[in-house]
Amino acid sequence: MPVDFKAVLSDLSAMSRTFHDEAVNYRGLHPDVAPPVVDAGDAGLDHALKEVADLIVALHTGFADRLDDRGDKVTYARDSFQRHDIDVHGLFEDLMAGDG
């Protein structure tokens, strides 16, 4: 495997790890973005505040899930590149076997 190709594979591995690590870190921020909702004294306002707080939590969770998903996709791309490189080298070696 060429040196340049190994560098790309290691970069993709690092990128995937970073996506997954940052998803974990982002999920760890949950208590900071989801403080308890206070009682405003008005049932309608309390309901509206709870809905907005639930939406913020859902967006926060969704973004962390997207980070994990991107990490999985980068891992898949890296594995595909590696499989393709092995296939190309195997084909080349098969073609050159009679020339030795």
Image (tube, rainbow, N blue to C red):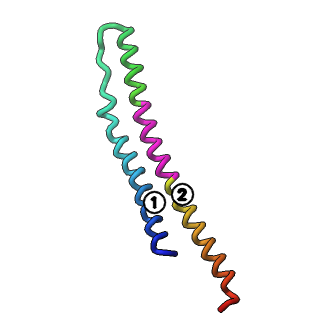
Q: Who comes first in sequence, dot 2 or dot 1?
A: 1
Is the Cβ of the residue at disc 2 closer than 8 Å to that at disc 1? yes
Percent position (x, y) of residue 31? 31, 34
Residue at point 46% right, 71% down?
Answer: 4
The residue pinned by badge 1 equals 12
- Which amino acid does the dot numbered 1 rest on? Leu
Magenta region: which residues? Answer: 58-73
Percent position (x, y) of residue 76? 54, 56
Residue at point 30% right, 14% down?
Answer: 39
User: Per the image, is 71 magenta?
Assistant: yes
Which of the pair 22/10 is nearer the observer?
A: 10
- Which amino acid does the dot numbered 2 rest on? Ala
Spatial CA span between label 2 and label 1:
8 Å
Q: Main secondary structure of the magenta part?
A: helix
Q: Secondary structure at mark 1?
A: helix
- Badge 2: residue crowd in 10 Å (few <14, some 14–19, many ≥20): some
Residue at point 64% right, 81% down?
Answer: 93
- Badge 1: residue crowd in 10 Å (few <14, some 14–19, many ≥20): many
- The image shows residue 1, relative to residue 72, as above or below, that is below
Q: Secondary structure at mark 2?
A: helix
Image quadrant holding the C terminus, namely bottom right
Taking 35 as reference, is 96 left or right? Answer: right
The residue pinned by badge 2 equals 77
User: Per the image, is 62 magenta?
Assistant: yes
Percent position (x, y) of residue 77? 54, 57
Which of the pair 40/70 is nearer the observer?
A: 70
Q: Residue furthest bottom?
A: 100
Which of the pair 71/1 is nearer the observer?
A: 1
